[in-house]
Amino acid sequence: MHSASHTGKPRSILTHPPLLALAIAAFGIGTSEFIIMGLLPNLADSFHVSIPKAGALVTGYALSVTIGSPLVAIATARLERKTALLLLMGVFTLGNFTCAIAPGYNLLFAARVLTALCHGAFFGIGSIVAANLVPRTQRAQAIALMFSGLTLANVLGVPAGTALGQALGWRASFWAIVPIGVIAATAVYFLVPPQTPTGSGLLHEFRVLRQPQVLLMLVMSVLTSTSLFCVFTYITPMLEDVTHVSPHGVTIILLLFGVGITVGNLVGGALTDWHPTAFQIGSLLFLIASLGVLYFAEPFLVPAVATVLVWGTIQFAAGAPLQARIVHHAAEAPNLASTLNQGAFNFGNAVGATLGGVMLTAGLTYRELPIASAAVALVTLTLAILSARLERRHQSTRTELTVPSH
């Protein structure tokens, strides 16, 4: 179902309007997910709760993606993929509308859970759609382009939403997301071609979980996300309290962070198509180093801002290979595996936000959060090395089986 030129040379993925439509939808979902980080102090003040309890809105969203996404994937398994994407964008728009009108913390929490239901399944199904639109050698780039909407949300959506929330109240931020959902659904409707789902039944799809490489990718997604959200959930109060940045300054830093993760995501996608395992291991080594530097840089404005930018770039570059690799390793059950990977990533969101919250509640400061993140990234690196060894062993075995005896 992919496109290529008549000369055999693959066309640029940037010329695929369906990928851009998926990126617009990803932008809306990313803005909705990450806006909470920028509004955390405002929400805590509005509902008279602590910062860690406000952080539970991140945890609740992430757990909803983790638990709900496979169920939504099962419910939509037989739907034509474009229809499924449109249905999920409808749920997304309704959820953000409910967030905007929620009178209390509990209803806001419930509305976030509703919004999250569409998240993992959309990115899971969308990844398969994106991969099917291009030649095999461009699949990681195509998936990264769709996910660039998620990272661009941090360049445009989150800083703009944070500034809007600070100026007009946090509800204004959610009101602004509602029309984004409508625009995204319209773009998907007109630009994304229909794709008939493939696969040989739900039981067969669950058998993919027996594969060690698939399980490793899922665990690495959890840990990569845990490392990110242990710090990122509390990035606003950390910059305000430790680095002494003004709320306006935080908005600018979030903008720079968004630029960094967008660049990291796209570069990570291109390098993954080049050499996935080597790039993954190398990027995790740099990630651990950047978190170590962040610990020392936090109290100082210029070093802290520079390190946050570099950290964001490396963090998303390190995560870029995971979605493409799980689509590769689970080719016979792509819908479920791809959606489970999104659930794994968001379970890591919940674990990371909870880990940071537990550390703060226990009396540790924002200063120590990067150290915990670096420790988690070190475990991820160990698993990446194990995955590379398994892959080499599998390729060696396959080579031995295909070489004819003399």
Image (cartoon, rainbow, N blue to C red):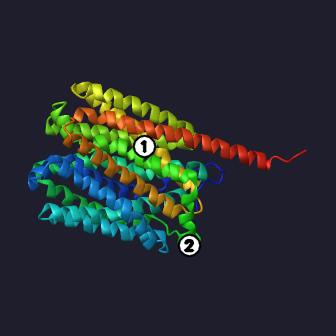
| Count of numbered labels shown in the rendering | 2
Q: Quadrant of the C terminus?
A: top right
Callout 2 amino acid: Gly
Image point (50%, 38%), residue name: 382
Helix or strand or loop: what does disc 1 sit on?
A: helix
The circle on residue 321 is none
Helix or strand or loop: what does disc 2 sit on?
A: loop
Label 2, residues with CA under 10 Å away: few <14, some 14-19, many ≥20: few
Q: CA distance from mark 2 to mark 1?
A: 33 Å
Q: Position of residue 317 (x, y in %)?
A: 44, 40
User: Image quarter for residue 210?
Assistant: bottom right
User: Image quarter for residue 245?
Assistant: top left
Callout 1 amino acid: Asn
Q: Are marks 2 and 1 in contact (CB under 8 Å)?
A: no
Q: Residue furthest front?
A: 362
Image point (75%, 45%), residue name: 399
Would residue 20 be visible to someone looking at this image? no
From the viewer's perspective, is 399 left or right of 222?
A: right
| Residue that mark 1 sits on | 265
| Residue that mark 2 sits on | 201
Kindly report which numbered mark, 2 or 1, lies closer to the viewer in this rendering: 2
Q: Position of residue 267 (x, y in %)?
A: 46, 39
Would residue 327 be visible to someone looking at this image? yes
